[in-house]
Amino acid sequence: MKETNKEWQRFLETRSEEAFRGLVEELLPLVYSTALRQVNGEAALAADITQVVFSDLAQKGDRLPANVYLAGWLYRHACFTATKVLRSETRRKAREREAVRMHIEEASSEPEWEQIAPLLEEGMNSLGATDRDALLLRYFEGRDLRSVGKALGSSEDAAQKRISRAVEKLRKFFLGKGVTVSGTALTALLVAHSSGAVPIGLGALIAGSAISGAAVATSGVSVSTATWIFMGKMKAITIGTAVAVGVTTFVLLQQKTIRRLRAENGDLEAKLEQASAATKPVVATGFSATELARLQNDRSELLRLRAENSKLRSQQGTRSQSVVLRASEAAKPPAAARANFISSQTWANVGFGTPQQSLQTGFWAARNGDIEKFKQSIVLTEGAKQIMMNLLAQLPGNARKEGYGFEEAIMLAMMSQDRNVGYKGYQILTEETPAENEIVLGVQMEMNSGKAEQKLMRFQRFGTEWKQFMDAEYFRKR
C-alpha cells in the first residue's frame, strides 16, 4: 500500500505517464475482476468499465484526500460504475426491443398487395394523364428521375415533385375505398408488384404467330378474330404446349390455303379435260377464237397455281421449323445471375468466419433488428465513437435524452434506409489485402428504389472472427 501511494503521489506531482502506467499495472487485476463479477462475466463490458474507472482516476485524482486508500477507492468506484453501466444497458436493450417492436408493427400494419391490386387500375385511371404517365415511367418501367423528367419534358426536380403528388393522390383514392396505406408503403408495393412475370415462350408465340398471320394474309387468307382470342388465352399453358400451339396454328392456316388451291386446281383440270375433249370438234363445229383464248388462259392459270402450291409446301416446312426454333430459344432459361450478387431475400446469420460472412451477417442483423449480432459484426474505435457522440448530440431532445448507444444508432439508421428505399442486395466488386489479418471489400448495395451505393468496407481479424473495422475516417467519408 505504501508503494502504491508513493507512485500515486509521484503521479500527482509530475503527471508522469510512466507513474500512472505503474499504478494501472499494479491495480488492474483488482478493478477488472470486480467489474467482471458485476457484469456476469461479459469480458468486453468489464474492459469498458475498467477503462472508465482508470480514466476517472486520472481526471479526478487531485481531488481525492491525501491519505486515501487508492485500492479501496478504485474498488468502490468500479462497483459504482458497473451499476451505472448495467442500468444504462438495461435501458438500452429495452429501447432496442421497443424499436424492433415498432418496426415490426409498422410493417405488419401496412395492407397486403391483395388489398391494393384489385383497385390499382381504377386508381391509376382516376389520375390525370401526366400524373399517370409519371407513375408508369417511374415504378412500372423502373426509370430513374432524370429519365422520367426527360420523358415528361421537365426537370429532374419537377419530375420528383409530380411523382410525389401522384402517389399522394393515389393514396387518397385507396383511403376513400377503405384501404389505409402510407405513401412509403404504397411506393414499395408499386415497385415490388407493378410488373408481373410473363410466361416463358409467350413472346415468341405471339411474335411467331403474328409474322405467320401476316405472311398468310398476303396470300389471300385472313386471320380471324377468334384465332387471336384463342392465342390470348395461352398465358396459362406450359412452354411445351405453347410451342405446339404456335406450330399448329401456322400449319392449320397453311393447310387451309393449300386446300383452297387444290380445289381451284381440280376445277381447272376439269375444264382442261373438257377443252382437250373438244379439240377435235373445234375445227368441225367451228369454236370461236374467243372461246379458244379463254381455254388457253385457264391452262396457264392451272400451271401457275401448281407452281404456287409447290412453293407453299416448301415454305410450310421452312416456316414451321422457324417457329419451333424461335419458341425453343425463348424457352431457354435467362442468363445466369451475377455469381457474387447476394439478394436481400437470401441474407442469413452465417457467422463471422470470413469477411464475406461477417458482412452478410451484419446486414442480416440490421434488417432483422438483432442488435447483439450487429454489435458482434463491427468494431468502433475511440475516434469513431467521438464522431458518433457529436452526431448523437445533434438528435432531437427526446432522442438525446434517451441516450442512444453507438451500435444501435448505426443499426437504426440502416433499418430506416431499408424501410425507405428497400435493400435489394449487394455485390462485392473488389477485394484487397493491405495488411495481414486485414481485408478491404468494395461493396455495391443496390436498392429497390433509388441509386446504388458503393462503399469501401475494412475488415480485421480478431481471434477466429472477422469484424468490420469502423474508425474516424470511415465516418468522415460519409
Image: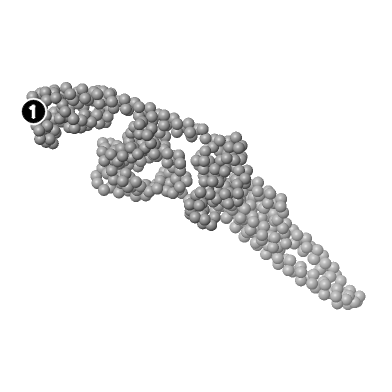
Question: Callout 1, which amino acid?
Answer: Lys
- Name the image quarter holding residue 418: top left
Residue at x 63% of width, y 58% of height:
211
In the picture shown, does residue 396 fall above or below 449?
above
* Quarter of the picture holding the N terminus: top left
342 relative to 20 in the view: left or right? right
Residue at x 80% of width, y 66% of height:
268
The x, y position of residue 415, in whole percent, is 41, 38
- Name the image quarter holding residue 277: bottom right
Of residues 451 and 437, which is closer to you in this image? 451
In the picture shown, does residue 145 fall above or below 31?
below
Residue at x 44% of width, y 42% of height:
423
Count how many numbered circles sit on residues in the image: 1
**Residue 433 appears in the picture as rendered:** yes
Residue, disc 1:
6
Residue at x 22% of width, y 25% of height:
78
273 relative to 97 in the view: left or right? right
